[in-house]
Image (tube, grey):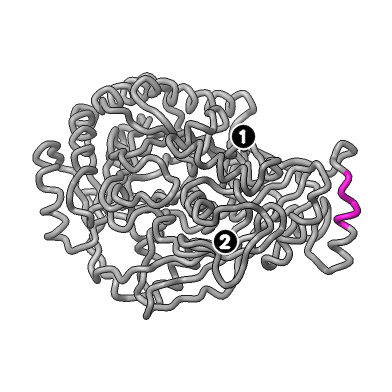
């Protein structure tokens, strides 16, 4: 929806079309199909959507737009929870998917385009019996996931997605195309900008998407997993919730790096299905067999006993199973003790069911309205969980809204890696407040109330918490909260590559 208030960039549009560079305006071609972001609550209307085929297209837009005051957004998959991968009135650059995924199983590396969906990457890795640390939603694209760090169910085993990053190919904000790794620029590339490439590569790993240029391709280290994998789901009622949550913190500090966990405290009042969404669920992935998994959980379950334990041992030596196991197929969920199947939630693992009238999954291709926020625990975990429990217990349940607090286990090898900009390595876990509902099911006032519920939850946690995770953004938070001790060093890198903040957005890294 172009308006008279949009910046006049018609000369650049005309030049793009003269050179055959993809350029979509409102009402043209796939504009409307490409316009929505994954959060249906937020609508943006760019003047131009540019589906870039390669680095040459990206460089054209960044170079030719230098003389214009116009918003420029970088979009990989469109999953930014606050829609800051898009804008209204400006230009949105959609990063290349680079359809050919280049896997070298001998040297354990993979090259992949920024716009490639995670499920495609996992599927292709499965053909070579390889894996890499990723998030759990197959619809998310590689670019945004990696730039923010990329937490997933292999964090304790191999770290963040960005920890596996070896090299990148990218276009800087002035249009220069470069290749770089931890040692500097490679393959004879360079830039006219006064840039320290080692610091730039550091910033790319966890410094947030859209800040320092447009990465078009990533090279990652990949791994050969053990052939057996065990998934588990553990559930507690309200009486056991607090002690189990505290015991889980010790589990996050476990020395066994094959153990990865994820949990959820839910606002749910459903006596007919109380173990679909109990007060506390802890799920996990163990790289090993069932006996090894039981051994790893034994001390934890002595501290926090529960009758509701579900285990699924799978094999990872069949490439056909990789995508279903790691991204969770619809038939991959456990059953209750009476044999009743628990419908899949669409998380990285099965931790419970959606509400009867709520969204089936947070990982589908279609946009869903939602609101999230995040924070990190301070030192008093007892206070963290008491505040969380009080807020949940005093919240009104809505049967058609999935409202919960996600618990993302950390520690392990993810805590040991200090090479990137992700600043929260010392934390045993992170917290994410979430509310998801179906498109068109809420009035504007009802949506505002849900946004306020998420914001109120974060504020209730604030006295016991600090910081936030940039992959779980909330426009109500100050951007400095996301980057902690890395903030000033990231601003230094921003000064080098984008001192005028041409790629700026609300939660972006700001130049000095």
Dot 2: element = loop
Instruction: Measure the C-alpha gap from mark 2 to mark 1.
Output: 28 Å
**Residue 9 part of the magenta-drawn span:** yes
Label count reads 2
Check disc 1 and report its element: helix, strand or loop. Answer: loop
The one of 441 and 201 positioned closer to us in this rendering: 201
> Label 2: which residue?
114
Write the residue at 49% across / 55% down: 198
Quadrant that contains the N terminus? top right
Q: Position of residue 195 (x, y in %)?
A: 60, 53
**Residue 383: where, in percent of width, then height?**
27, 22
- Looking at the image, is 372 positioned above or below residue 359? above
Identify the residue at the far bottom of this view: 106
Secondary structure mostly seen in magenta is helix
**Which percent across, then down, holds residue 393?**
34, 22
Mark on residue 259? none
- Image quadrant of residue 165? bottom left
Q: Is residue 404 above or below residue 494?
A: above
To which residue does mark 1 refer? 512
For image coordinates 72% across by 47% down, the residue present is 72
Q: How crowded is mark 1: few (under 14 residues within 10 Å), some or many (20 or more)?
A: few
What residue sits 26% from the left and 70% below the top? Answer: 315
Residue 242 in the figure: left or right of residue 367: left
Report whether residue 403 is seen: no
Residues marked 2 and 1 touching at CB (< 8 Å): no
* Viewer-proximal residue among 52 and 236: 52
Q: Where is residue 502 in the image (x, y as percent from the top left)?
A: 71, 44
Q: Earlier in the sequence, mark 2 or mark 1?
A: 2
What is the magenta range?
8-13
């Amino acid at each position: 929806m172009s308006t008279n208030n949009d910046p006049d960039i018609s000369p650049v549009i005309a030049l793009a079309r003269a050179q055959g560079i993809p350029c979509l305006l409102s009402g043209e071609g796939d504009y409307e199909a490409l316009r929505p972001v994954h959060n249906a609550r937020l609508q943006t209307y760019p003047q131009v959507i540019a589906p870039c085929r390669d680095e040459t297209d990206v460089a054209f837009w960044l170079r030719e737009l230098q003389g214009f005051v116009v918003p420029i957004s970088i979009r990989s998959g469109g999953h930014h929870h606050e829609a800051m991968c898009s804008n209204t009135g400006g230009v949105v650059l959609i990063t290349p998917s680079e359809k050919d995924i280049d896997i070298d199983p001998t040297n354990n590396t993979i090259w992949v385009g920024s716009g490639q969906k995670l499920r495609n990457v996992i599927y292709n890795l499965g053909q070579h019996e390889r894996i890499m640390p990723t998030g759990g939603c197959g619809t998310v694209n590689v670019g945004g996931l990696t730039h923010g760090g990329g937490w997933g169910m292999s964090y304790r085993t191999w770290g963040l997605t960005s920890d596996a990053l070896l090299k990148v190919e990218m276009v800087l904000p002035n249009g220069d195309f470069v290749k770089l790794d931890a040692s500097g620029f490679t393959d004879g590339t360079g830039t006219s900008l006064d840039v320290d490439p080692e610091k730039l590569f550091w910033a790319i790993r966890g410094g947030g998407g859209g800040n320092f240029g447009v990465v078009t391709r990533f090279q990652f280290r990949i791994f050969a997993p053990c052939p057996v994998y065990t998934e588990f789901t553990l559930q507690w009622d309200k009486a056991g919730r607090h002690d189990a949550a505290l015991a889980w913190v010790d589990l996050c500090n476990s020395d066994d790096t094959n153990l990865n966990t994820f949990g959820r405290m839910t606002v749910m009042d459903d006596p007919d299905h109380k173990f679909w969404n109990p007060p506390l669920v802890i799920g996990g992935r163990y790289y090993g067999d069932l006996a090894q998994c039981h051994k790893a959980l034994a001390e934890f379950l002595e501290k926090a006993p529960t009758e509701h334990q579900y285990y699924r041992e799978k094999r990872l030596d069949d490439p056909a199973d990789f995508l279903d196991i790691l991204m969770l197929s619809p038939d991959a969920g456990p059953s209750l003790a009476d044999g009743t199947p628990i419908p899949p939630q669409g998380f990285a693992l099965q931790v419970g069911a959606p509400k009867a009238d709520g969204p089936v999954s947070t990982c589908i291709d279609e946009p869903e309205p939602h609101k999230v926020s995040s924070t990190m625990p301070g030192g008093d975990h007892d206070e963290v969980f008491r505040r969380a429990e009080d807020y949940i217990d005093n919240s009104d349940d809505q049967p058609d809204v999935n409202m919960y607090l996600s618990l993302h286990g950390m520690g392990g090898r993810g805590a040991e890696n200090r090479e990137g900009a992700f600043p929260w390595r010392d934390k045993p876990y992170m917290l994410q407040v979430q509310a998801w509902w179906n498109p068109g099911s809420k009035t504007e006032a009802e949506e505002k109330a849900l946004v306020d519920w998420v914001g109120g939850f974060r504020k209730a946690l604030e006295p016991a918490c600090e910081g936030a995770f940039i992959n779980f953004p909330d426009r109500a938070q100050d951007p400095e909260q996301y980057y902690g001790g890395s903030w000033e060093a990231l601003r230094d890198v921003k000064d080098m590559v984008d001192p005028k903040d041409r790629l700026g957005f609300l939660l972006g890294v700001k130049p000095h």
